[in-house]
Image: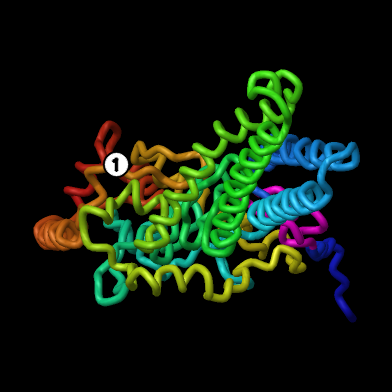
Amino acid sequence: MAVVSLKPSKPKPKPTRLYEVWKGNNKFLCGGRLVLGHDASSLFLTSFLIGCPAITFCVRMFFHTIKGGNPLYGYPVLIGGAILTILAFTFLFLTSARDPGIIPRKAPGEEAFDLNTPSMRWIDNRNFSAKLPKVKDVKVNGHTVKVKFCETCLLFRPPRASHCSICNNCVQKFDHHCPWVGQCIGLRNYPFFILFISSSTLLCIYVFTFSWVNLRQRKGTLWHNMSHDVISVVLIVYCFICVWFVGGLTVFHLYLISTNQTTYENFRYRYDKKENPHTKGLLSNFKEISCSKIPSSLVNFRALVTEEGAPGVTSDLERSLISSKQKMDAEMGGKYGKDGNMLMPSMLNDLDCNSIDDHLKKKAGEKEAAFDIFVPTNQELKYSQQKSPKGASTAQYKEKR
């Protein structure tokens, strides 16, 4: 006779797109095709600061030309301004709406927690160790470079990668997080960022120059022309101020490219004062940025995944490991961060427990040889109460035995 189980079967997890369950702070558009940063709303301000003066200049040139201006001068200047404006917005879009080089927290089909890695050995009760590896050495162009373990993404970052606290992602060749484009600047969008700030600088210089020419073309004194062409005066002042910021940023990044540094490396490691392991010479450094193919994204945000197996999403195994880890650490008085990772005391970072374990094992062996530890069971206690004299203790009963 067949046995029918009345226990309801567990429903299969419904597949979903990876971007819908992504653990980072990114914002996605067009079904995960466009990857924006956490503060993507700043794009509205940036677009206004670029588009308002640029469009005003183009409209100004158009009406100036149709109202009797020289068409051989007006239309070419108008077209040049329109082209630079379109380029600036195009490079802004390519910088802010693409994956900057996000490193996945775990490979598809693999658990984020790997019990075989040294960083997770302390979870196993059978092999508790406080010696947690924080860095490891790798070779880059013959130089030894230290790479750090990311406690949030649970991986050793590749050389030149860093974790962005705003977007909550590790990014390849992390340069900085730009609030003006609302996105991290990394390996996959750095060339477009350079083109964006360069085209914006050229646009500022272009509008400043031809607004000044428009004033000088008018008949009369300069002060008279300024009073009758307020728009050109405002554009001159605005572009003069902006070119110092965006132009200075462009010059700074040209210096970084020439020395093959990132902004993060320049401020943190100060390669101008010590040897840079990444530089390949002036021409090769510029060639690396301008001629190298942009690598493919490491994360397919449109991939169909289950919520438990999605990279960066806590699975049942991870929850059980975290729960056991927190329970064990609660008895030790440990503390935890917001991401659920244990914050080990600084004095335990370099503590090697192997010698301590050996010493404790040696002591335990000596005690076993010296003492016969008697632990009565429930049955023996019941027997002792029945057979032993009233008021006699278990120790006395053991002595009689």
Give yes or no for residue 19 being in the magenta stretch. Answer: yes
Rendered view: 203 above or below 362: above
Q: Is residue 239 left or right of residue 66?
A: left
Look at the picture and state if 302 lies above or below 69: below
Left or right relative to 313: residue 250? left
Q: Secondary structure at mark 1?
A: loop
Q: Residue at x 66, y 33 (%)?
A: 216
Looking at the rendering, the stretch of residues picked out in magenta corresponds to: 16-35
Q: Nearer the viewer, residue 210 or 396?
A: 210
Residue at x-position 46% and y-position 72%: 288
Q: Position of residue 182 (x, y in %)?
A: 63, 44
The residue pinned by badge 1 equals 345
Which residue lies at the image location 76% right of the left edge and 21% below the top edge?
228
Name the side, left or right, on which 274 lies relative to 10: left
Residue furthest to the bottom in view is 1
Horizontally, residue 153 falls left or right of residue 346, namely right
| Residue 95 x/y as whole percent | 64, 55
